[in-house]
Image (spheres, rainbow, N blue to C red):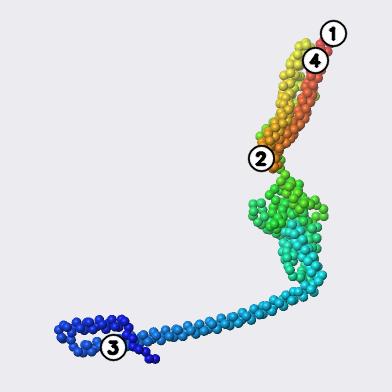
Amino acid sequence: MTSTLNIPRTVSTFIASLLVVLGLLAAGPVHAQEGSLQQLLNELSEAREQKQQQAEERVNRFIEKVNEREAMLNQALEARNEARERRERLQETFDENEAALTEKSEELENRKGDFGEVFGVIREVAGDTRSIMRESLTASQNPERAEFLGTLSNTKELPSTGEIDRLWRTLLEEMVATGELARYETEIVQPDGTREEAEVMRIGPFSAFVGSEFLNFTSSTQELSVLPRQPPGHWQFMAANLYESGGDAKMLAAPVDPSRGSILSRLGEKPTLTERVQQGGLVGYVVIAIGLIGLLISLERFITLGLAERRMSAQRKDLDNPNTDNPLGEVLKAYHENQDTDTETLQLKLDEAIQRRLPRLERGLATVKILSAIAPMLGLLGTVVGMIATFQAITLFGTGDPKLMAGGISQALVTTSLGLITAVPLILLHSMLNGRSRRLIQTLEYQASGIVANHAEEQNQAHA
């Protein structure tokens, strides 16, 4: 390859600098040798040749790279052209397939005829069944059925014979499940949100429980959860008996909820006795306290009067040996101490002994009577307070939400009930205690009258 000699700029600069240096040397003392200049010229020639060779090598490498880039460009152009041709061929194939698919779809619709209506009914049945089963308690045991029915109801293709057969079997299985007692393992949600595996007993689509704890089925999440508030104890007792029997007993009472969980949930929300008492507020607690005080006094009186009656019965069997641990014994003691006196004095002494014993026999009866009268009056007071709270709620919030008035109404009714519940037993207890006390007093008076009569008769015989 032939090329013109191009001296690089750096080489030209170097030669010019060298000539200046040589000129300066020539202007000085002439003692330089001819050999040194020749050697310098040779070195400059060699350096020039090396630079020229390096320049030619760089030019050659550049030309090689240009050729490589041109080859790569040609390859890319060829690949682009091939891709365009392939796209055109695929587009033609797609158009042909689309036309064939349209033609076949029309042919399928024409051939289906009445089968289209049949399959429409199948899809409709599948959709309705899915809605029913998602709300049913049986879905907790077989959750996969809802997914199959959803797929079948939303498909646009003709269902296969296998799918039709599975739909038929699913309907039969649901019919059987609504009348069976089943036990199965599944996940339940506790009231605190924790999840755990448990063996659930299900009574058809009506109720489900684990031990004595009833479960609620949430259709939106398809989960079983323990009711936060369980129904009353006898319902839990029936569930526990049935659960422990494993369903093998021939005859057992079972908690069946025809509303599929609603009634059991409402029963669980029913206030307990403690909550009822709390609804009565301060007045309700006062009424209960009065009732307890009255019951304690009545209990003490029953015990005391019972002991007195028993000891008096024993004393009547031994009138000659009076014992002061009973009222009759004190009357007999008064007689023995004054049997030498006249009849009138003895009568007065015996009356004094009876009167001295009366307060202990009648103690507490007046208190019970007063408490029995106060209790219903406090109940009426609670009624007034509750109605005032109700009217205040109506004044502030109106009558749109009955729950805002429920607190006052509950207090009004609960306190009235507590007052009556307290008053009626206290009245009965007072009547019973008063009757027993009167019988003991009458016994003392009867014995005293007999003693006086016998004393008077003995004196008359002595004077005769």
**Amino acid found under the numbered disc labelled 2:** Phe
Find the distance from the CA under tag 4 to the CA under tag 2.
78 Å
Q: Which residue is mark 3?
A: 45
Q: Which residue is mark 1?
A: 464
Q: Quadrant of the C terminus?
A: top right
Q: In the structure shown, which secondary structural element does the residue marked by tag 1 occupy?
A: loop
In the figure, is residue 74 to the left or right of 399?
A: left
Find the distance from the CA under tag 1 to the CA under tag 3.
194 Å
Q: Which residue is mark 4?
A: 452
Give whichever of discs 3 and 4 has the lower sequence position.
3
Taking 363 as reference, is 21 above or below it?
below
**Amino acid found under the numbered disc labelled 3:** Ser
Find the distance from the CA under tag 4 to the CA under tag 1.
18 Å
Quick check: marks 3 and 4 in contact, CB under 8 Å? no
Label 4: how many Cα within 10 Å (few below 14, some 14–19, many 20+): many
Give whichever of discs 2 and 3 has the lower sequence position.
3
Location of residue 430 (image quadrant) = top right
Give whichever of discs 2 and 1 has the lower sequence position.
2
Q: In the structure shown, which secondary structural element does the residue marked by tag 4 occupy?
A: helix
Q: Which residue is mark 2?
A: 397
Q: Depth-wise, is mark 1 or mark 3 nearer the camera?
A: 3
**Amino acid found under the numbered disc labelled 4:** Val
- Residue at image location 74% in from the left, 70% down from the top: 157
Image location of residue 376, percent across then percent down: 73, 30
Q: Depth-wise, is mark 4 or mark 1 nearer the camera?
A: 4
Taking 85 as reference, is 133 above or below it?
above
